[in-house]
């Protein structure tokens, strides 16, 4: 009908023109036949106008209907149910990581380390309403018990002014803020154990100067190093352990990100920090090796009390297939060997790491991971992308952790059962079979430096009697 109407109108115009032209029959212009023909043409013209108007209304209704008709799509990153205009949507995704940890060249007294395990098993539900309200809900079933990792709402007023509330990662560590499964290695570095992980709070943040500078400032319940919110006696609860709150801030600059021809386009640098006060009920965190074995633990009687602050300068650089990420973290806390002890110590623990990767197949390296140009397909002879990675990583613990408190007669940590320093070297290979599937194999070599006066002969921790050598393999799918 839409294509027929213009042709009909053109025909009527031609007929009208013919009927009005002077001719040999001009004497008959006032005849009844000519008048009847002109009337028919007029009526047909009116009918065409009515049809055109109906078509316009039909087109308008179709546009309105398209905006209200839901669309179900799969975009390679999950299933999306969206309104016709895209202003609102719900996205359903998933994340599964299956690992094998294998330890060798260790003291025979260390047992039960080798294992297959489900590292992470998550359902990801996120969405948007009216283009300015978003949310994320992520339950995890990969641990000993189901838990809610992320649950927050973000109100976007402008790109420069966004308000977020709920449970999410505190804006501090560079590597900690990187999505699991996109980093160079299967496990994060020691730095991520010094800075806080997920916490409950509210923050204001956004992007300035066309994304060249991002900022975040928030108020949170407060968590020990590397921990999630509300850890009380080893149990995660959905609340605060005390009445005090932590303030977290972060600035991160990417000054050349909008300059496509600049070799510094992939440069980013910044700093994150927290400041707060923790009470004894907050608990004290231990630290793990790169392959996730507990290497350091405070005494069960030790309590945290007093000001806690952290700072973490950080940077990355990506250029084509090459990527580099470096980070330092200092965590300062006040603690006592026991609740009844009078001697409060200020403890300063430090960690730093330098990681690098190179994509052998030529794809771009990035903070958000590698997207292969081809998908693995045995029949077609395509293999996806391959990346080699390396890391140097150090955890340096305060020597005052192992000095006895004169008033309590004991130390914050047992010097015979804990290292004072851990140095780790990592090498790995990542195979990106597709945008959603990744296989990784990492080798970690950990060197333990013992406190003064402790040797491999008198340590009571069998794990510390030799270096730790481990291989971690992972197959993951994320959508």
Image (tube, rainbow, N blue to C red):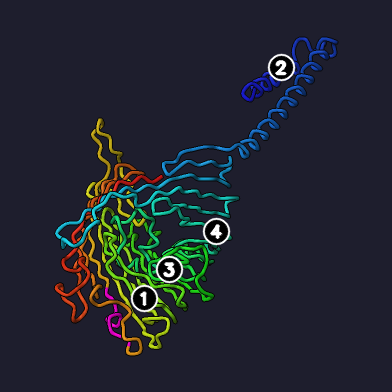
Image vertical order of residue 117 relative to residue 286, above or below: above
Q: Residue furthest bottom?
A: 406
Question: Could you classify mark 3 by the number of other residues whose Cα lies within 10 Å: few (under 14), some (14-19), or many (20 or more)?
Answer: few
Residue at horizontal 28 percent and vertical 46 percent from the top = 439
Which tag, 4 or 1, sits closer to the chain's start?
4
Whether residue 53 appears in magenta in the rendering, the answer is: no
Residue 474 in the image: above or below residue 226? above
Q: Which x, y percent locates residue 125?
A: 50, 48
Give the structural element (helix, strand or loop) at label 2.
Answer: helix
For mark 4, does the 10 Å Cα neighbourhood hold few (<14), some (14 to 19), or many (20 or more) residues?
some
Rendered image quadrant of residue 383: top left
Report x, y in % for residue 288.
Answer: 30, 65
Residue range highlighted in magenta: 396-405
Nearer the viewer's eye, disc 3 or disc 4?
3
Mark sitting earlier along the chain (3/4):
4
Query: Residue 302 or 389: which is nearer the viewer?
Result: 302
Q: Nearer the viewer, mark 2 or mark 4?
A: 4
Above or below: residue 221 compared with residue 13:
below
Residue 341 picture location, percent across and down: 40, 85
Q: Label 3 to label 1, Cα distance in Å?
A: 21 Å
Q: Earlier in the sequence, mark 2 or mark 1?
A: 2
Magenta residue check for 404:
yes
**Residue occupied by mark 1:** 331
Side of 23 relative to 413 (left or right): right
Residue, x 44% and y 82% (percent of image)?
306
Calculate the distance from the C-alpha at mark 2 to the C-alpha at mark 4. Answer: 64 Å
Residue pointed to by mark 4: 154
Dot 2 or dot 3: first in sequence order is 2
């Amino acid at each position: 009908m839409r294509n027929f109407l213009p042709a009909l109108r053109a025909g009527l115009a031609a007929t009208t023109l013919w009927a009005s032209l002077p001719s040999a029959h001009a004497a008959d212009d006032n005849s009844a036949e000519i008048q009847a023909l002109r009337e028919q043409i007029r009526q047909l013209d009116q009918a065409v106008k009515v049809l055109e108007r109906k078509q316009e209304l039909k087109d308008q209704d179709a546009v309105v209907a398209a905006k209200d008709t839901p669309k179900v799509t799969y975009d390679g990153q999950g299933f999306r149910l969206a309104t016709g205009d895209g202003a609102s949507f719900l996205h359903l995704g998933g994340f599964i990581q299956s690992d094998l940890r294998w330890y060798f060249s260790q003291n025979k007294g260390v047992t039960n380390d080798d294992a297959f395990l489900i590292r992470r098993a998550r359902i990801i539900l996120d969405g948007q309403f009216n283009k300015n309200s978003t949310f994320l809900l992520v339950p995890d079933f990969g641990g000993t018990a189901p838990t809610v990792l992320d649950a927050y709402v973000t109100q976007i007023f402008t790109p420069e002014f966004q308000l977020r509330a709920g449970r999410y990662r505190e804006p501090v560590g560079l590597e900690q803020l990187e999505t699991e499964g996109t980093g160079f290695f299967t496990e994060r570095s020691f730095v991520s154990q010094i800075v806080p992980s997920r916490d409950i709070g509210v923050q204001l943040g956004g992007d300035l100067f066309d994304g060249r500078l991002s900022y975040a400032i928030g108020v949170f319940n407060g968590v020990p190093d590397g921990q999630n919110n509300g850890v009380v006696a080893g149990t995660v609860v959905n609340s605060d352990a005390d009445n005090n709150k932590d303030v977290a801030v972060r600035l991160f600059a990417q000054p050349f990100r909008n300059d496509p021809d600049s070799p510094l386009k992939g440069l980013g640098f910044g700093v994150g920090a927290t400041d707060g006060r923790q009470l004894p009920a907050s608990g004290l965190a231990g630290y793990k090796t790169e392959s996730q074995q507990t290497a350091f633990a405070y005494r069960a009687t030790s309590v945290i009390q007093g000001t806690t602050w952290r700072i973490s300068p950080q940077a990355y650089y990506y250029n084509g297939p090459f990527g580099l990420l470096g980070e330092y973290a200092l965590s300062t806390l006040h603690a006592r060997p026991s609740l009844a002890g009078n001697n409060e110590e200020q403890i300063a623990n430090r960690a730093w790491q330098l990681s690098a990767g190179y994509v052998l197949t030529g794809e771009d390296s990035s903070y958000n991971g590698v997207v292969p140009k081809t998908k693995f397909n045995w029949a077609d002879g395509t293999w996806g992308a391959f990346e080699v990675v390396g890391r140097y990583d150090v955890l340096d613990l305060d020597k005052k952790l192992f000095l006895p408190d004169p008033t309590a007669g004991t130390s914050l940590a047992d010097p015979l059962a804990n290292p004072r320093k851990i140095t780790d070297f990592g090498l790995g290979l990542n195979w990106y079979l597709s945008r959603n599937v990744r296989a990784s194999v990492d080798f970690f070599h950990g060197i333990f430096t013992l406190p003064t006066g402790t040797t491999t002969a008198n340590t009571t921790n069998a794990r510390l009697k030799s270096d730790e050598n481990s291989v971690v393999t992972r197959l993951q799918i994320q959508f």
